[in-house]
Structures are given as structure tokens and as C-alpha cells.
Amino acid sequence: MNALILSALFGIILMLSSIVIKNKSLFKHIVAIELLVLLATAYAELRGNILFHVNVNNMLAFNHFNIYISVIIIASTLLFVLLCGKQIENVGLHVAEYFALLFFILCGSFMVVSFQNLLILFLGIEIISIPLYILTGSDKKNLKSNEASLKYFLMGAFSTGLMLMGIALMYGATGSFQLSVLQIGTLGGYSFVELAGMALLFVAMLFKVSAAPFHFWTPDVYDGAPTVFTSFMATIVKTTSLIAFIHLFENKFETLPPTWSLSISIIIILTLFIGNITAIFQQSVKRMLAYSSIAQAGFMLFPLLTNNVIAKEGIALYTVAYSIATIGIFAILMHMKDYTLEGFNGLAQKQPLLAAANTIFLLSLAGIPLTAGFFAKYYMLSSVIKTGQYLWLIIIAVFFAAVSVYYYFRVIQAMYFKQSIEGGLITTHISFRFKIGIFILALFILFIGVFPQAILYWIYF
Amino acid sequence: MIPILLIGAPLLTGIISFFINNATTAKRLALFSSIITLAIMLVDVFGLYTSDTFSAPWIPVLGATFTVSIDGMSKLLCLLTAVSFPIIFIATYKNEYKNASSFYAWMLLSQAGLMGVFVAADALLFYFFWELALIPAYFLCSQWGGEKRIQATFKFFIYTFAGSLLMLVGIIYLYTLTPDQSFSIQAFYNLKLSVAQQSWLFWLFFIAFAIKMPIFPFHTWQPDAYEQSPIAATMVLSGIMVKMGLFAVMRWLLPIFPQASHQYAHIIITLSIIGIIYASLIAIRQDDLKRLVAYSSIAHIGLMCAAIFAQNTMSIQGVMIQMFSHGINIIGLWIIVDAIECRTGTRKISQLGGLATKAPILTILLVIVALANIALPLTNAFVGEFLMFNGLFQYNIIAAAIAGLGIILAAVYMLSMIRNVFYGEESSAVVKAVDIHAFIKIALILIVLLILVFGVYAKPLLQMIQ
């Protein structure tokens, strides 16, 4: 509750502050401080100190796990702002608004990770989506950015429509929006109307997390949006939507007809297939990361199917590992003159520290041991193996994990084993502080890769 | 404590080496570190100070512990690793590398990974080291290798990574079956697996190990990777890293899946024997020295794998001795190949000839190493191959007979290589060649000493693995 209310408040404050504060570079410091406050209050709530006692009529549930996820979200956003604050300033004129919109997205994220009521889910998703439409199109003079924004808006509006329709049908069948009521109703089997509603909701959520075959908007939107906001979309927004999705269908698939588990396994495989295979053919690293985010979502959908404790721990770990690594890679990408693979040629000679950090991030995404990504994948595989079923799914997933090495390593090859294009600068100016920050982040990835309990411990304590 | 030092010493110096600017300093540090590691190993081998196990909590939530221990089998392979690295560093002492400090850093890290694989007594830890050994190899080969290095090592990396992911699935599955949720090797040994479970888990592990060895249908990465790697990395790959697969089969596969290992033994032995004949025949046709040695290595590994699955005391003992001997011999061969290439500028057998008059010492040493590679009596390989054939003979006479062809074929390609490269008419490439310098001489003499000593008196090795 603390974080939810404060984030909305901070957003409004920031929006209004642009009237008073004219110095553009001041905002990122304000935002950093606000995020620190947010982090502190969220942590306080984790320890049981609730600042605002609001009666939410059980529409929201702030249990330990949900608050912990909120803490992770805030920490990732803080990282994002510290590393990319400068780039946000450079996007356009309305710096305060961009930051305010980020806070509104955070507010929506807290709602969707702790919803107990379908209306709150809907509200949260909308609060996330609308600022994102604006941020995607914030590079106003760029045609690609405009196109991406429009595409995103149309697709988003369409999936929201489906979602509303689904919610309405479910309400019609059960007479309630409460998740608990919907779950109790499962004992006597589902009526056709409820199943239809659930199917619509399912598809709408697949749209939001860009799982195949509902992923077509993702590459274009990620590619067109200003890179800073792509980074935010691909990490924080994506993982939040996934957690909401998993929460929505918690304990559902056991009671639903078996075709549902089959269809989710097929969707996982399709997502892994399309994400990984298409990523191989990308020449632009930014676009490659868009497809890689689809592929990673394939792994993050496992908890939907397995629904056990390992999956719950795993999704927390996966969120951390994936978000940090992706934020890191994007932060480095933003300093490159050229976003293609060739643009990375010879980075190791010019910027050894950045190249080393980038390598660690990429290894983590590929799931190589000693990095956080390994344990993330480990937990996901482990949760499926624990069920004792779906062996074929595991083998296919493992195969695609090996495929993913191919495109992540192409960046490493470019950085280390190829010569840079003659004479040209490959990077813009990089401050010493940025380098240190990136390097600490990389060390953190390695630390989690050796001691994953540093993240897992907080789920329970 | 010893296993910790064996992993820790190269790991620490490896990390330090990344931050050294001076190439000579890095080179000296690497040599120094490898000698220290050897000294630690010798302390253990001679029983001056034995403290063979170490255990500490690592990831309590998973039940994974940092447990390392040395038993007879791992002692032999740790010794091989400890002996090989100083020899490699000495032999390539004169080689110049761009970015030398990173090169030596990766070499040392790969040594740490290899040591870890051999001493790990916890499945997750084993998996970690298994990968830790692979990543340095990847960077070594693709940064300092030959022309087509990037594709070759990429293939190698993806191949082995896919294999190890399958193994990871197997490890997790076994882990969920253990009563107290533990990764310890003892808990895995105590599992009572049904035949059905064993029969598919067996393959998950076997494919990972087979790719690493490599066994016949999984071997395609190997000749390219050996050919394209810088010579020091090739020595590590072929001398020690392929032993990881064989070691893992004996350490993990046979004890955990006893029934499946018997059930599928004939398939694997057949594959291995196909590999022996196939690789030997291809080796005869090779014109490139590096590829010749690479294919000869596939043939030798095939024989070792077949002997493991014959599963009697004789053959297993033979494999262990042969793992050590083969490691030493093949490093010797690579040193010679590198020496030839440095002196003449080519590896093509067709362009070489009459080197013996120009480099007599090299020739003598080569002949000894080559004869050891054919497993002539009085060389170290003879003991191992004799035991392996004996064991294979007990398993199946026909298998032993066909595998025996491998020795004959080995003689064909080795001796014809010696004839073509060292004798006959002097070719234009050889005219300006000079004999080897002191560093290579020292390295090769050490190897020849090891070959002869263990060829005549193999008892210490046999005692070690009892």
C-alpha cells in the first residue's frame, strides 16, 4: 500500500513541478531520491510497517511475496534511472512528464502484482499501458516512434477490449469480480460462459506479455520506441505483466480441462521457437533484444503450467536476473553510435570494462553457470521436472536455451574477436561513473550466480 | 584442503593475470602458478600431507554444498592436469600473443575449472566446474585461434553447451528423487532407480559426456576446434578436457545407472569401435598435421570409451592409466606439430620432407612420442592399451579384434607421417629450418621421460588408482 499511494503521489508532484523547476537536469536527481523513498517505504512494509491503512475491500492483497516483488520492481527502476537518466533527458523537451509517466507505470505495476479483483487487474493494466503509449511516441519527430506508438495503441486497445469482454463474461457467469470467488466456483466445474470469458482473458494476457502467436507488435514497438523506454518496457513492464498473468491463473490449470495445459505448453514452445529463431536473423542488436525478450518470456511462462513453490521462487529470481541483465545491455547499447552488430566490433579494445560487463550480462541471459541467469533457468526447469510430467517440453526448452547462445554470443564475438570499423568512434562519451555503475551491476549478476539465496531469502523473511 | 588449493591457486592467479599489463610478467606468473599447483599436487601424491576432502555449505535453500574430495581416480587426473600445464607453458614460452595477460588468465581459469571437475563431489558444483572449464576454452580458441576460429569454436561451444544442458535436466531430476533434497554424489549413488527411469536418464547424461569425449556421431566439432585453436589451448582441449567426459562416465554414469550401463553397453561399444576405425581411416588421408593428430585422438578416445563400457576391473584400470598416458603423449605430439609449423611455416605433410637432417633432436623425440602413441611396448601407452584390450577381449572377442585394427591403422598413419615429414627429399619449406630451442627441448624431454618411466614401471600409477 505504501508504494502504491506514494508512487501515484510522486507522479503528480513531478508533473506539477515542471511549472516551477526549469532546470532539466535536476529532475533525474529528484526522481532518484523519490525512488529511494519509495524503496524505503516498500521495504518498511515488508517488515510490517504500513503507513497508510486503507480499506480496499479485499480487492488488493499485500502479502509478503507481492510486496517483495514490488521492492524488486522499485529497485530495478532505480537502477534504470541511475544508469539511463541522462538518456531520458535527451529524448525530448518534457522531461518532467516522462518521469511522471514512469511513476504512473510503477503505480499500475503495484496494482497488477497484488490484485485480488479483476477490475483492479484491468485498472492496473490500463494505468501501465496508457503512459506507455505516450512514452513510445515521445520521440515526436521520428516517424518510426510515431508508428510504433500508433501500432502499440491499436494492439493494446484491441487486447484491452478482449480482456473487458472476458471479465464481463466471467462476471455474468459467477456474479463476482473477486478472484477468490472465481476460484471457489471451480469446484462444481465451469460453465461454458465462464470458460469463454477465461479464454478471452487468457488471450488478452498473452497479448500483454507478448507470447507467440500474439507477439507481432513487440519487435516493431520495441524497435521504434526511444531506446531508454524500450529498456523499461522490456524489463519492468514485461515482468510485471507476467507476474500478474501467473497470479491470475494460479491453481487454475489443475481444475480446467486438460486441453488448457496442453495449449499453454504449445504456446510456451511457440514463444520459445519464434523468439529464438527470429532473434538469430536480426542484424540490429536492439531488435535482437526485442526477440530475446519474447524468448525469455517463454521461460517465464513455465510457472503458469507448474504452479508450485519452486516456480514462485523461480519467477522472483528470473525477474531479477532478466531485468538487471537487460537493463545493463540496453544502458550500454544506448552509448553505441551504431545499433547493429557491426557497431559492437572491437568494443573490447576501446572499452574493456564495458565489454566485460556486457559479456557477463549476455552470458546471464544465455543462462551460463556462474551468472544469475543460470539459476533463473535452473528454477524454471526444476519446477517443471518437479511435476514429473512434460518431459518433452523440458527437452524442447533446453534445446532452445542452447539456440539462444547463438545470438547472444554473436555480440560477444563482435566485441572481442572482430576489429572495429576503421578510425570511427564506436561509442559516445562515457563517464567514469557510468562505467563503475555498470561494472558493479555485472559483479552483482555474478554474485547472484554463485549465491542465489541472496534473492531467495527475502521471499520468506 | 588440497582440493581447495588445487582449484584456488590457478583461479586466484588467473584473476590477477587479467589486470597485468606486461606480457612477460603474465607469462612468468602463469608458469610460476602452474608449478606451485604441481607442487601442491605432488605433496598429496607422495602422501606428505593428505587432507582430501573439504565441505562447506553453499546454497542451503537447494541443499547444494561445496564439497570437493580426491580419491584415486581424481588424483590421477588432477596429477595429469597439474603436470600438463607447466609443460604447456614451457613449450609455448617463446610464443608471442596479443593481449598476453588475458591469454594466460584464461589458461589458468581453465585449469581451475578442470581441477574442479575432477574433485567435485556435489552434482551442482560439478556442473558449475564443467561449464567453468568450457568458457575459458571458448575465449582462448576464438580470440587467439586460426583463420576460421570463430565458426569452429562457436560450433564447439554450442555443441557442448547443449549437451551439458541435457545433463542439467538429468541432475535436477535425480535431485528431486533424493530423499533429503541433496546434490551430494553419495545421495545420488544411493538412489534406487527403476530400470525405466535409468534408461532415459542414462542418455541425458551420456550425450553430454559423449559430446565432450567425443564419441563417433558427436565428434564433428572436434577436428575443426583442434585445428583452429591456438596450440596451447589445443593441448588443454585434447590432453585434459576430453578426459572430463571419460572421467564423468566413470564417476557419475556407471555408479548411478548400473543397469542401464549394462543394457546399453553394446550400443556404446559399437559406436566407439565405429569411431576408432572411421577416425583412423580418415587420419590416414589427412594432409594437415593438426587434423591428423585430432583424428588419431578420436580413435584413442573411442577405444577408452569402449573399454569403460566393457566394465571389468582390467579394462577400467587400463582406461585410467591410458587417460594419463594419452594426455601426456598427445601434448607431446602437439608440441612437435607446433615446432614443425614454427620452423617451416606449414603444417601440410605434402609440403614437408627431410626435416631429420635439419632437426635431428626433434626427430628423435618425435619418434619416441609417436611410438608411444601407437602403444609400443616400453612406452607408457602400452600398459594401458594392453589392459584395455584384455578387458575388451573378456567382454567380446569380435569387438576386441575389430578395435585391435585401430592399433594397426595407427601405425600406418603415424609411421607414414614420420616418413613423409622427416625423411625423404628435403622440401623447399624445410631448407631454412633449424632445430628446436631449449624450451621445447625441456618440455619434450620431460614428456619422453614420463613416457619411458611409466612405460617400464607403471606400478605407482596402478597403486594410485587402487
Image (cartoon, coloured by chain):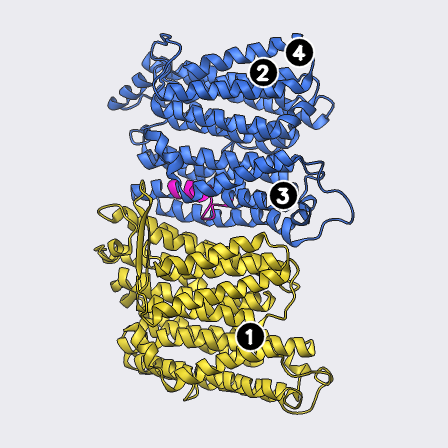
Chain colours: A blue, B yellow
Secondary structure category for the residue under label 3: loop
The residue at the point 60 percent across, 11 percent down is: A15
Labels 1, 3: front one: 1
Q: Which is the main secondary structure of the residues drawn in magenta?
A: helix
Q: Which residues are magenta?
A: A366-379
Earlier-in-chain disc, 2 versus 4: 4
Instruction: Tell me, yes or no, whether the two marked residues, 3 and 4, touch with CB atoms within 8 Å.
Output: no
Residue A45 image point, x, y percent: 38, 18
Measured in 3D between alpha carbons, the distance from the residue under mark 3 to the one under mark 4, in whole angstroms, is 42 Å
The residue at the point 29 percent across, 48 percent down is: B175
Labels 2, 4: front one: 4
Earlier-in-chain disc, 2 versus 3: 2
Amino acid at circle 2: Ala
Amino acid at circle 4: Ile
The residue at the point 58 percent across, 74 percent down is: B290
Viewer-proximal residue among A12 and A382: A12
For disc 4, the neighbor class at 10 Å (few under 14, some 14 to 19, many from 20) is: few
Measured in 3D between alpha carbons, the distance from the residue under mark 2 to the one under mark 4, in whole angstroms, is 14 Å
Say which mark, if any, is on residue A282.
3
Instruction: Tell me, yes or no, whether the two marked residues, 2 and 4, touch with CB atoms within 8 Å.
Output: no
The lab-note entry on whether marks 2 and 3 share a chain reads yes
The lab-note entry on whether marks 1 and 3 share a chain reads no
Residue that label 1 marks: B334
The lab-note entry on whether marks 2 and 4 share a chain reads yes
The answer, for residue B160, to whether it is visible in the render is no
Residue that label 2 marks: A100
